[in-house]
């Protein structure tokens, strides 16, 4: 077989494999989306009649509304704290050389490989031994630990792609270090900071496994409320709520990619 024909054949096979993988990943979401419009009070596919009443049910159900409010509170605090802490650690790890640097970086990134139920159980035991109730503070602290690696990675990559000649030029013209940070460094890092915060917010709002251990009835987030709901009911309300989740997350990612250029921030696309 000629080399050019062999290369074209490999290219077609690679594209086909990618399409099959994407189809395998998208198919469950498509099935859930279609099932959400079922008119019957039982989750079934395909629907014989179409209705929007389960979307109204998902919006009106009180536990979902309370879980959504609690999720917003936890997400707001955890994403902001993770952004501040992660940005500071990323700056220190990028700009300074010191002992145990690799060890500290490994500890900060360890939640990526530690199962979330282990983190949640650890925070539950810690809160119980310290005499703390399963309050918002415990939930926020748990979420900060889980989303911190994503903020750290996003800001760190932005720092690595930052041209330090701008900072050196400002310093050589007499700008103080604080002025260089506020007028040069932070504006150039803004896409990485915003994308890090966005990833932290999305992951925090969708976190379930660890939240199941550290939340109580008054602090349960929306994923935990969904879990409690599905243990008692089998109607398509869960599918309707899942569709809202998918649409909301896709809209946020699309917005971030359009205005921030996530490919450049994540170092998968070279800056022009």
Image: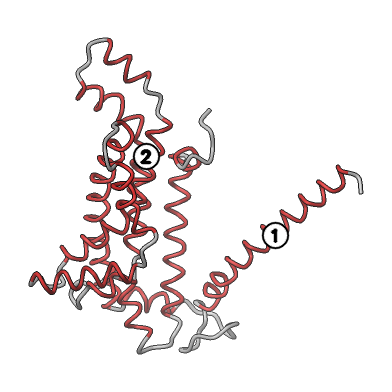
Local SS, label 2: helix
Where residue 45 sits in the image (x, y, percent)? 58, 83
Quadrant of the rendered structure where residue 92 is? top left
Cα separation, mark 2 vs mark 1, equals 32 Å
Query: How many numbered discs, if any?
Result: 2
Query: Relative to the observer, which residue lies in front, 69 or 152?
Result: 152
Question: Furthest-left residue in view?
Answer: 131
Horizontal side of residue 250 vs 85, given as left or right: right
Where residue 130 sits in the image (x, y, percent)? 9, 69
Residue 257 vertical placement versus 230 (above, below):
above
Where residue 163 sits in the image (x, y, percent)? 40, 24
Horizontal side of residue 152 vs 39, given as left or right: left
Question: Furthest-front residue in view?
Answer: 99
Q: Which mark is residue 17?
A: 1
Crowdedness near tag 1: few (<14), some (14–19) or many (≥20) residues, C-alpha within 10 Å: few
Local SS, label 1: helix
Residue at the spot 70% in from the left edge and 59% down from the top edge: 17
Q: Which mark is residue 156?
A: 2
Where residue 109 sits in the image (x, y, percent)? 35, 52
Quadrant of the rendered structure where residue 203 is? bottom left
């Amino acid at each position: 077989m000629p080399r050019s024909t062999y290369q074209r054949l490999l290219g077609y096979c690679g594209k086909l494999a990618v399409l099959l993988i994407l189809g395998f990943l998208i198919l469950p979401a498509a099935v859930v989306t279609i099932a959400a419009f079922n008119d019957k009070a039982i989750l079934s596919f395909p629907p014989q009649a179409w209705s929007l009443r389960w979307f109204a049910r998902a919006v009106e159900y009180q536990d979902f509304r309370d879980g959504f409010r609690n999720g917003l509170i936890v997400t707001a605090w955890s994403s902001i704290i993770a952004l501040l802490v992660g940005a500071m650690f990323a700056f220190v790890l990028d700009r300074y050389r010191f002992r145990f640097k690799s060890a500290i970086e490994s500890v900060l990134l360890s939640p990526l490989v530690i199962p979330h139920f282990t983190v949640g159980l650890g925070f539950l035991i810690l809160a119980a031994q310290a005499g703390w109730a399963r309050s918002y503070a415990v939930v926020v602290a748990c979420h900060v630990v889980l989303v911190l690696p994503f903020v750290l990675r996003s800001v760190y990559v932005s720092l690595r792609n930052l041209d330090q000649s701008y900072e050196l030029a400002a310093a050589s013209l007499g700008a103080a270090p604080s002025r260089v940070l506020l007028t040069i460094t932070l504006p150039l890092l803004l896409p990485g900071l915003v994308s890090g915060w966005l990833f932290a917010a999305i992951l925090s709002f969708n976190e379930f496994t660890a939240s199941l251990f550290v939340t109580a009835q008054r602090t349960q987030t929306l994923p935990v409320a969904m879990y409690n709901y599905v243990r008692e009911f089998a109607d398509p309300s869960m599918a309707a709520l899942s569709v809202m989740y998918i649409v909301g997350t896709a809209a946020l990612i699309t917005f971030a990619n359009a205005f921030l250029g996530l490919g450049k921030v994540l170092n998968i696309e070279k800056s022009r």
